[in-house]
Amino acid sequence: MAKEVKKRRRGYTRISRKNQVTLPAEVLRRTCLGPGDQLKVEPDGRGRIVLTAETDPIEKFIGDLTGVYEKGYLEKLRSEWD
């Protein structure tokens, strides 16, 4: 007797006995996540889990350009917007 093969639905996954899940490749591509990325895992109500990249890419670079502009330059530039 042949074993019945269950079809996988696109965008769905299953929790294994070891509490592991496989994330769909398309979802990872669209979120710019990949192997080795650290994720924060939080519950968000019954049946919902939120995964968030551990570091925000913008926060990673905040302060990198310190000292590039002379003191007061950015304030002068911002005042031109009014």
Image: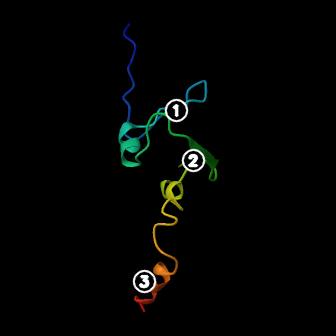
Nearest the viewer among 47 and 39 is 39
Q: Looking at the image, which residue is at 46% across and 85% down?
A: 76
Q: Residue furthest front?
A: 70
Quadrant of residue 79 in the image?
A: bottom left
Query: Looking at the image, do the residues carrying marks 3 and 2 touch, with CB atoms under 8 Å apart?
Result: no
Q: Quadrant of the C terminus?
A: bottom left
The amino acid at mark 2 is: Glu
Which residue is at 50% across, 34% downward? 36
Mark 1, secondary structure of its residue: loop
Image depth: mark 3 or mark 1 in front: 3
The percent position of residue 68, horizontal first and vertical second, equals 46, 67
58 w.r.t. 31: above or below: below
Instruction: Using residue 25 as the reference point, say whether residue 60 is left or right of it.
Output: right
- Mark 3 or mark 1, which has the lower sequence index? 1
Residue 47 in percent (x, y) is at 59, 46
Which of the two labelled residues, at mark 2 and mark 1, occupies the earlier sequence position? 1
Residue 77, horizontal then vertical, whole percent: 42, 83
- Return the residue nearer the eye: 20 or 15: 20
Q: How is the image coloured?
A: rainbow
- The residue type indicated by label 3 comes to Leu
Q: Which residue is mark 1?
A: 21
Secondary structure of the residue carrying tag 2 is: loop
Q: Which residue ends up furthest to the top in the rendered image?
A: 1
Are the residues tagged 2 and 1 within 8 Å (C-beta)?
Answer: no
Q: Amino acid at mark 1?
A: Val
* Image mark for residue 45: none
Where does label 2 land, which residue? Answer: 54
Between the C-alphas of marks 3 and 1, the distance is: 49 Å
Query: Which of marks 2 and 3 precedes in the sequence?
Result: 2
Q: Which residue is mark 3?
A: 77
Within 10 Å of the Cα at label 3, are there few (<14), some (14-19), or many (20+) other Cα atoms?
few
